[in-house]
Image (cartoon, rainbow, N blue to C red):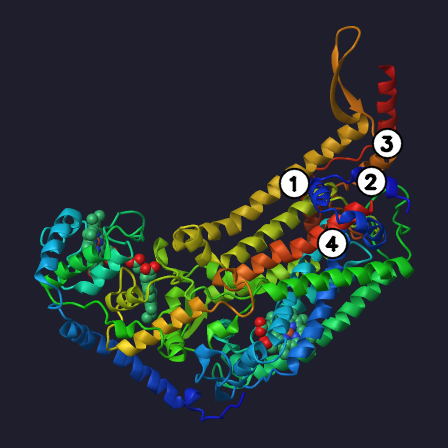
Amino acid sequence: MNKRKINNARRSPFAAILVIAAGLLVAGGGYAGATAAVAHSTSGSYTQEQVDLGKKLFLSNCASCHGKNAEGTNYGPSLIGVGAASVDFQVGTGRMPGQASGPQLMKKPVQFKQDQIDALAAYVSSLAPGPSVPDEKYLATNGNTTRGGELFRINCAMCHNAVGAGGALTEGKFAPNLKGVEAKHIYEAMVTGPQNMPVFNDANLTPTDKKDIISYLKYIEANPSAGGEELGGLGPVAEGLFLWLFVLGGIVGITIWLGAKSN
Amino acid sequence: MSTATSNAQKKGGFLAGTANYLDERVGVAGILKEFGRKIFPDHWSFMLGEVALYSFLVLLLSGTFLTFWFQPSMVPVIYDGAYGPLKGAEMSIAYSSTLDISFEVRGGLLMRQVHHWSALLFVAAAGLHMLRVFFTGAFRKPREINWVVGFALFVLGMAGGFTGYSLPDDLLSGNGLRIIDGMIKGIPVIGAYTSSLLFGGEFPGESIVGRLYSLHIMLIPALILVFVAIHLFMVVIHKHTHYSGPGKRDDNVVGYPLMPVYVAKAGGFFFIVFGVIMAVAATFTINPVWSYGGYDPSPVSAGTQPDWYIGWLDGALRLAPTHLEFVIGGYTLSMNILLPMVVGIAFLVVVALYPFIEGWVTGDKREHHVLDRPRNAPTRTAIGVAGVVFYAVLWAGASTDLIATHFKMSLNHVLTTMQISLIVLPIVSYIITKRACLSLQRKDREIVLHGRESGRVVRLPHGEYIEVHEPMNEYEIYKLVDFKAYQPTLARPNAKGVITVRARIRARLSRFFFEDRVEPVTQAELEAAHDHKELH
Ligand code: HEM
C-alpha cells in the first residue's frame, strides 16, 4: 500500500493542449495509418492451392452477394483490399456468409472449418493487399493489463461498456458483449472495424497496444469479481432490479410468511 | 387482541398460499410457529418503515467501518496495490483507498458491499413505506406533518446515496458527477458560478470528493437521524393507525402494548433485515469499482447509470426532447436540461404537499386513525397509481439502452415509446384504476347486502334455480361498510357574497375527486336486505 505522490500534470492547463494534440494525432494518423497498415500486410504467405480452393469456396458461397470477382454487388460490398484479417474475422465469428436480417448482420454458428476459412482469406488477400491475420505473438495474454484497461476505457468502453458487457447504438444496432471472443478475433475486429465499429489501425493503436487490450479483456474474463456473483456486469440497473425483486421482495416475503404462520 | 378471529379468516391469498406451500416442503414453520406468534405484526405493510430504519442502522455501522480506511482526497498517486489490472495506473487517493478497502482490508469488500446494498435497501424500503402510507390514507390529519418529515427522509436518502456513490472517484461515479455538473451549468445566470463554487473551479477540480465526503458522513446522516427521531416521536404521539375492523375507531388504538411484546418483535425483525443484507452482500457483487477504472474526464462508458433511486432523474434527462434550445441575447437556454429539472422538482413538490391538497379539497378537519382501503378512496388511489406509473416510466427511461439491447429493439424506438408512455400511461392507468376501485366498491355492496356467492346452485321446490349466497359475519361486514363517501362541495359565496376564484377551484377539484362515488351500505339498507332474505 505504499504510494508515491506524483506531480499534477493530469489536470494542469497543459492537459487540454495535450488532449487536443493527441486528438489531432489520432485523426491525422488515421489516414497515414490506413496506408501503413496496407503496406505491412503480407499476401505472399499463402500457397497457390489455398488461393485456388478459396476461389472455389468463394464462388459457391459468397459470390452471390460479393460478386464473382469480389467486386461487390447490391447485396454486399467489394472485398478487394479488405485483407485476410477481415475474412478470418467475418467467417470465423460466423458473421459471413451474411444473412440479411434486421439492422445489423448477426453472428451465427460458424459454417466453415479453419482451413477453409484460411483458403477464403488466401483468395481475398490475393486480390489486393490488406490487413493480414495477426501474428501469434500479439495474441498471447501476457501483455500489460493496466495499460490495456486504460486503452480499452478510452477507445472501446463508449460502445462496448467499461467491462465489455456491450451497449446499444442507434436504430437497433449494438456493440456486442466481448466475453468469450477469441483473442485473434478481437485483434481482427480492431484492424478491420466490422460494420459500425471504427478501424483501429496500427497508428492509433500499435500492435502492442492491441495485445495489451486483449490481455486485459482476457484477464477480466478469467478472473470473476472478488465480490461474488456479478449480475451480468450490467451495473446499477441490474443491482437495482435485484434489490427490488429479491432483497426487498425477500424481506416482505419473510414477513408475510411468518405473519401468516402466527395466525 | 380482539381481531384475531377475523384475521384468521381473511388470510389465504396467493402469498399465504405460497408460504404454506414452502412450509409443507421445508417444514421450518413448525418451529417458528410459537416464535412467530409473538414476533410478527398484524400486517406486513406496517413493517416497511422498520426495514428502512434497520437498513439505516446497518448503513451507520458499515459506513463507520469504511471511514477508518477511506481517504477523501483527489491528489493523484500511482497505484501499487493488489489488483493486477490497475497496478501502475495513476489515480486519485480516494479511488486507491477504495481499492485498498476492497482488496487489502480484511472484511473491507464485504463492508463496502454491505454499505452499498443497505443504501439501496434503505431508499427502496422508505419508498415502499411511503406508498403504503399514501394508499391507505395514513397521511390524513393529524399526520400531515409526519408525511412531510417522511418525505424529507426519502429525499435525504437519495442525497446520501448520491454523495456516497461519488466518493470512490471511479469512472462510473465520475460520469454521474459530470452529468450533475452539466445540469447545474444549464441553470440560467447562476449555473456557471454555482458549478465553479461547488467543484472549486473547473470540473472535476480537486475538491469535490472531500466536499461530498463532509456532506456524506456528517451533514446528511445527522439530518437523517434528527428526522428519524422526529418521525418516530410523532408516531408515538399520534399512535399507530390501524386497518378497519370492529372495535377499531378513530378515537382508540388496538394493538399490542409496547413493552415487552413490541420490543421483542422489533429486535427479532432487526436481525432478519440485517441477516438478509449480510447474505446478499456476501454473495452478490455491487459496484465493482475496480472494473470501472479511476475517473478521467475523457472516457465515457456505454451503460452508464446511477443507482436506482437517482434513475428517475437520469430517465427524465434522457427522455427530454432534444433541440429545445433557445438563444436569448447571446445566452443559450437549454430546455432539454431545464425541463427535466422543473418536472422533477414539480413532481417532488406535489408528493410533499399531497396531504394538504387533499385535506383542502375534502375540507375534512376530523382526525383519522382508521386506514382507508384503497378502493374506498378511488380518486386518491387512481392519482397514486398514475404517479407511480409516471415515476416508473422515468425510471425505465434511465435504462433505454439496456432495454434496446436485451429486447432487440431499436434504441430510437424505445426512446420514442417511452416519451409517449410518459404522458399517456399515467392517464390511462388513472382511468383504469378509478374504474376498478368503483366496481370493487359496488361488489362490496353486493356482498354486504346479499352475501358471498358460494358457487352452489340449488333448485327450489317450485322449480326455480338459485345460487346460494352465504351471508357474511359481522366482522367482515364491518370492514366493508366502515368508510365515508364524500360529496362534492359546491362553490359557495363568502361573507361578502362573492364566489372567489379559490372557492371555484376548490369546487372544481372536489367534483373531480368525488363526482363518481359508491356510498357505503347503511344500517337501514342492511336491515332491509335481511328482511328481504327472511321472505325466501
Ligand atoms: C444516509 C445514509 C447513507 C447512504 C444512503 C449511503 C450510501 C453510500 C453509497 C451508495 C456509497 C458508495 C459505496 C461504494 O459502492 O463504494 C457510500 C460510500 C461511503 N459511505 Fe455511505 N451512505 C450512508 C451513510 C453513511 C454513513 C453514516 C457513513 C459514515 C459514518 C458513511 C460512510 C461512507 C464511506 C466512508 C464511503 C466510501 C467508501 C467506499 O466507497 O468504499 N455512509 N455510501
Neighbourhood count class around disc 4 (C-alpha, 10 Å): few under 14, some 14–19, many 20 upward: some
Q: Nearer the viewer, residue B435 or B248?
A: B248
Neighbourhood count class around disc 2 (C-alpha, 10 Å): few under 14, some 14–19, many 20 upward: few
Label 3 CB-ligand 1 distance < 8 A: no
Three-letter amino acid code of the residue under disc 2: Ala
Q: Does the residue at mark 3 contact the one at mark 1 (Cβ under 8 Å)?
A: no
> Label 1: chain?
B
| Residue for badge 1 | B434
Secondary structure under tag 2 reads helix
Q: Which mark is residue A55?
A: none
Q: Is residue B27 above or below residue B351?
A: above
Left or right of B181, for residue B52: right
Q: Which mark is in front, 2 or 4?
A: 2
Q: Is residue B64 above or below residue B340?
A: below
Neighbourhood count class around disc 1 (C-alpha, 10 Å): few under 14, some 14–19, many 20 upward: many
Left or right of B155, for residue A32: left
Q: Nearer the viewer, residue A216 or B162?
A: A216
Q: Position of residue B326 (x, y in %)?
A: 42, 67
Label 1 CB-ligand 1 distance < 8 A: no
| Residue for badge 2 | B8
**Who comes first in sequence, dot 2 or dot 3?**
2
Neighbourhood count class around disc 3 (C-alpha, 10 Å): few under 14, some 14–19, many 20 upward: few
Q: Is residue A149 above or below residue B150?
A: below
Q: Which mark is in front, 3 or 4?
A: 3
Query: How far apart, in angstroms, are the residues tagged by discs 2 and 4?
Result: 24 Å
Q: Position of residue B323 (x, y in %)?
A: 40, 62
* Residue under disc 1 on the same chain as residue under disc 2: yes
| Residue for badge 3 | B473
Three-letter amino acid code of the residue under disc 3: Asn
**Who comes first in sequence, dot 3 or dot 4?**
4
Q: Which mark is in front, 1 or 2?
A: 2
